[in-house]
Amino acid sequence: MIPLIGVLILAILVIMFLMSSIKIVRQGYHYTIEHFGRFTTVAEPGFNFYMPFFYRVGRKVNMMEQVLDIPGQEIITKDNAMVAVDGVVFFQVLDAAKAAYEVSDLYTAIMQLSTTNLRTVMGSMDLDETLSKRDEINARLLSVVDQATEAWGVKITRVEVRDIRPPADIVNAMGRQMKAEREKRAVILEAEGMRASAILKAEGEKQSQILQAEGTREAAFRSAEARERAAEAEGKATQLVSDAIEKGSSQAINYFIAQKYVEAIGMFARSPNAKTILFPIEATQLIGTLGGIGELAREAFGKGSGAGDAGTLPATPSGKRKGPFEGGAPS
């Protein structure tokens, strides 16, 4: 009976020994193994076997990427403006041994390091720069904090400034400044529009005057050309009349005088003050004059004045066509 109890006790001790020797490490964690209090190795995820009483687990280190909040704080900028700032830090442990034994409290160390460097970086910038250059602030913080935590086996992946809150009076002043700047740009744009409009208007007037001057010049040229042709025609007509007179034809002078006579009668007829016109002339004289014009036209075209022509006008009683200035005065 006693040997059976001893075997049972021995079996229980063996089972306890084996259970104490087996170390199961979860995924995403590393365990540091200490031999009589001194670090010896790192247990990776999975099944690990270490002799109990001689080896024990020292620290359980999280190897996944972690997020650490930077608490809100008030920072004085380079131009003595007070702003409230907070942010976040993303980091990952790469060396479990260094993270466990190179720094006492890893999380507190990273938070304090990020806070002090945030004050340093933003304190060297103006308020406008802190509001407009967040990417530069994040990059500078990342570089400084990552370099400082490299000895702790930690990799700083990102540092983000989450919120920047200037005082209320500065916010109001910035609003007024932005409004004034927008009004200034609006006035400038309006002035530029008026300037462009005036330039276009002046260009249009200039072009209009140029075209008008060219039109006036063309009209004057055409008018002069017309007057020149009219003068040439008048000169040719006068020359023809002169030649006819030299040849002894009285019908030519009658045609010339009758033309002026008819033009004068037309001017009397177009006069707005003329109500009644008295002609101190006999109808036979005017008919004779028209007959002389027809005869002159036939002579000019080389046609004979035959007896059977339909355009022949009746002659005066004396057998000779007279113009208005041939023969005696009207009775």
Image: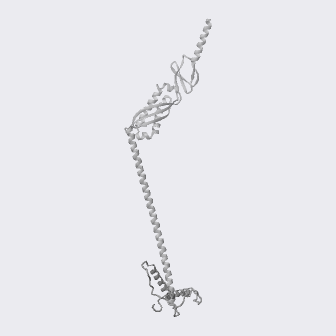
Front-most of residues 312 and 53: 312
Where 141 sits versus 38, above or below? below
Q: Position of residue 37 (x, y in %)?
A: 50, 19
Q: Residue furthest top?
A: 1
Report the number of discs: 0
Is residue 258 visible from the viewing direction of this image?
yes
Point out the image quarter for the N terminus: top right
- Is any atom of residue 253 visible in this view? no
Q: Quadrant of the C terminus?
A: bottom left
Horizontal and vertical percent for residue 137?
A: 45, 37
Report the residue that reaches farthest toward the front: 276
In this rendering, is residue 21 above or below 241? Answer: above
Q: Residue at x 40, y 43 (%)?
A: 175
Rendered image quadrant of residue 198:
bottom left
Q: Viewer-proximal residue, 28 or 212? A: 212
| Viewer-proximal residue among 170 and 112 | 170
Which percent across, then down, holds residue 114? 45, 32
**Relative vertical location of residue 130 with respect to residue 12 in this rendering, above or below:** below
Q: How is the image coloured?
A: one colour
Query: Where residue 217 sits in the image (x, y, percent)?
Result: 46, 71
Q: Is residue 313 above or below residue 175?
A: below
